[in-house]
Image: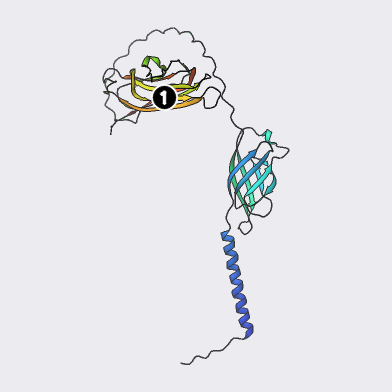
Amino acid sequence: MMILARSLPPGLVNLALSRILTLSSIVFVFAAVVCAQAPVIDAASVNYGTSRLTISGSNFGTGSSPTVSLGTVAMVVQSYSATSVVAAFPSGSPLSSFAPGSYLLTAQFQVPGRSPTFASETFDVTLGTAGPQGPAGATGSQGPTGATGSRGPAGATGSQGPQGSIGPSTVYYSAQKVYPVSEVVFTSNGYAPATSDFTLIAKLQLPDGSYLIQGVASMTNLSSNVLNGQCVLLINENPYSIAWTGYFTLPPYGDGGDTGVFNILGTAYAGMGQWTAGVGGAEAELKCIADSVSQVQASAITATLTGSLIAQ
């Protein structure tokens, strides 16, 4: 079989090349649109001296000026780039008119080469800071004891019901209170305080069982000296029978860091050396000691009843 080849006229060749180049341009533009990245806000900070809000991030674009709002207030953009925007608080809503709290920052950017061209990004901004904690107030006097009510008649004994299935874990919790901590002198040769030297700051009555016990104490140094202290969890007044913090220090009052929160975690169960089973449960105690004037603002014991404790 013979195939006859015929050359194309110059006009048709130019038209074919033109269409190929046009198709290549369309593919290139489409790829550029797809590759443009969305704007991302990494941080936002307020300068209280200049009343300016600075937004930092990436891919902000270099098109028209972005729009910025904080809460419901539209900000006045002072300058912008692909990685930063500086905006001022408007005269009608100055920085001083904002109450301390968290506000939603919304910014809309024009990113050339991206579809859609405009893209929005949000960020949480916190205004204002918390002031220092005030001094603890004096402990009020105890109120009078109310009269004892008359005892009601005993009810009839009901029949014993069937044994129920094992329920979920039970949590016992002591209410938080405020206690001044007694001062005890620590000697230089490593004096170990006796149980009677500690101040009781929380206690909890527990029936027989196996427990995961946690004690929490928030202590403040009220003196002008460095405080040395220690907190312990006890069962039936046996020293160090559950856990203790070891010695800790707190800076003088007002120096910053004069308040510390101390957590103690341990286990206890009926039948251990300090807890004889079958005698009516036990008493868990949280006690603290200090060598300077101090106070525990909040203290609590939490005991979670478990099915069993396995030592490994």
Instruction: Say left or right for 306 vs 110.
Output: left
Measured as percent of width and height from the top left, residue 247 is found at 41, 24
Residue 301 occupies which quadrant of the picture?
top left
Residue 238: give x, y in percent of width and height.
32, 19
Q: Quadrant of residue 114?
A: bottom right
What residue is rendered at 38% in x and 22% in y?
232
Q: Residues within 10 Å of mark 1 (few under 14, many from 20)?
A: few
Q: Which residue has dot 1 on it?
A: 247
Q: Residue at x 39, y 15 (%)?
A: 197
**Residue type at mark 1?**
Tyr
The one of 47 and 215 positioned closer to us in this rendering: 47
* 4 or 223: nearer the viewer: 223
In the rendered image of this protein, does residue 56 appear above or below residue 273?
below
Above-or-below relation of 269 to 50: above
Q: Residue at x 59, y 61 (%)?
A: 33
Return the residue found at the far front. Answer: 189
Q: Answer above or below: position of 78 versus 207.
A: below
For the point 65% across and 47% down, the residue is 85
- Residue extending farthest to the right is 91
Which quadrant of the figure contains the C terminus? top left
